[in-house]
Amino acid sequence: MFLIMSAAYVGQELESEFGKIPPSFLPLGNRRLFQHQVKLAPENVEVIISIPESYKLSSIDLKWLEGNTVKIVRTPDNLSLGASLVAAINLTERSLDTPLHVLFGDTLLTSLPTGDDIVGISEVQDSYNWAVVTDDDMHWLENSENNLNADTNNVVNGYFKFSQPRQLIKSITQSHWNFLGGLNRYHKELGLTAVKTESWLDFGHVNTYYRSKAAFTTQRAFNELIITPEWIEKSSYKNQKIRAEANWFDTLPPRLRGYIPQYLGSSNTPERFSYRLEYLHHTALNELYVFAEIPTIIWKKILGGCIDFIDECIDFRAPDGATVNKLSELFGVKTKQRLAEYCESQGITLNQKWVFNDQEPVSLAELVSSCELYLPSEQQKETVLHGDFCFSNILYDFRTGRVKTIDPRGLTPDNELTIYGDTRYDLAKLSHSVLGMYDWIIAGYYNVDINGEKIAFDLAGTRQHKETQQAFVEIVEKRFGLTALSLYAMQIQLFLSMLPLHADEPQRQQALFANAFRLYEILKRLEK
């Protein structure tokens, strides 16, 4: 049995950023932490996750856990660690004749150490109330009481393996459900060995969460991305996109630099072009929108910060004759080209009728013509433009209440460098995440089935974020005069234009296709 112990809620610091969730439900790499933890389980070993009895598990998380044959055990809230472990084991109603692996819900390893009756230990850089291994057989494990000395920085990392689970339950019970007391008693009876693990990632405290997240991202980074605790470097060979990003950061007006990480310059050699930014230990908004459980009042504050950035960009007009991104080029022309490309690849036509969730049949041509009625048509002077201002490119600092943005577009459709364009495109990209629910699709939180010309589509999160979406629509209309109809019309254009870009993920491509019809249905309701 492989037991992930996540039957308590995260501490206050993490709760202030992610809401009241169990540690295994924290975001990591655009997934839940438990989706990475489950992969650690040895082959043919049953995986069980314990969660608080009071936690409301979403249907999409339940579906993932059940689809990956993970048994869910709910234990009473506010139990001690030892009592929670005993309760979880008993509630599984499984045989106690096979070894038991225990992984704390805030812990992730690259691989499991080998051996029986082992306690994983790792080095730490912080002084929290860790459990440490001592030379005292009677108190082999004890709390450090936030007082680690220079010679004792190896702490218990949250992975254990026990050859005799029945003896473990007995030992913890005899120790009045004290976890460390139970382990000391088990050690005295059967013996435990401390095994050092180098690749420990700890997500139990806000500092270690962001440090571990950076380390996790570094492990999975491409050759063109280097991440250190201080800076991040992006590079490429003959790639105009990276040059465009660097140019945007380099030429951004000083007043707007409070909205970006510190730009640390670029390097240009015959082999490659690269630039560096300060590495910020903040969470991107896409992970907060999909995985956190924070109230609408906080989302209003976050969205207000995003709107403030766009508002300030408007103060910096493009010089006469400057290269700019025009709204008509980013929407109408590009959408029709991309949609024609998609239809050809799928063997379908623009006039073919589709039935979305048992609604009236409608064609792609009708989607395009309907939204064209509401696309912004009045001329607007081009100003500083981010160009890809969606949630995955926006970080939020909960301490200062400020947004920081990364990965700007910096290019026209003709691959010319520019920092200017129509800020309504930034509003469209922001709406793409808020109203279009793009990040939920990227995270795989949907069900889609396209059978012939019938589309069945269900997207998680739409009910959860209704208040936030309404607040966003009201803010945008008040500050920029753009109506909900215009915002949804631009969304339909964006989702249709991105279809060819997701050809490598057919299931996701189907979801993006279906989502355009979902947005169309909302548009039609708004017309009434």
Image (cartoon, rainbow, N blue to C red):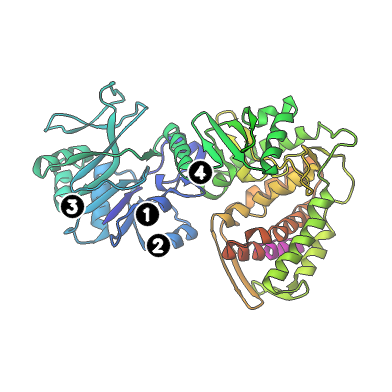
Q: Earlier in the sequence, mark 3 or mark 4?
A: 3
> What separation in Å lies between label 4 and label 1 (alpha carbons)?
21 Å
> What separation in Å lies between label 3 and label 1 (alpha carbons)?
20 Å
Image coordinates of residue 239 in percent, x first then y, are 67, 44
Q: State the SS at label 3.
A: helix
Q: Which mark is residue 221?
A: 4
User: Which residues fall within the magenta stretch?
Assistant: 515-524
Residue tagged 3: 165
- Contact, CB < 8 Å: mark 2 with mark 1? yes
Q: Which mark is residue 47?
A: none
Q: Which mark is residue 68?
A: 2
Q: Earlier in the sequence, mark 2 or mark 3?
A: 2
- Does 317 sit left or right of 305 as displayed? right
- Contact, CB < 8 Å: mark 4 with mark 1? no
Q: Earlier in the sequence, mark 3 or mark 1?
A: 1
- Can you tell which of label 3 and label 1 is closer to the viewer? 1
Identify the amino acid type marked 4.
Ala
> What separation in Å lies between label 2 and label 3 (alpha carbons)?
24 Å
Q: State the SS at label 1.
A: helix
- Contact, CB < 8 Å: mark 2 with mark 3? no
Residue tagged 1: 38
Residue at (62%, 30%) from the top-left corner? 261
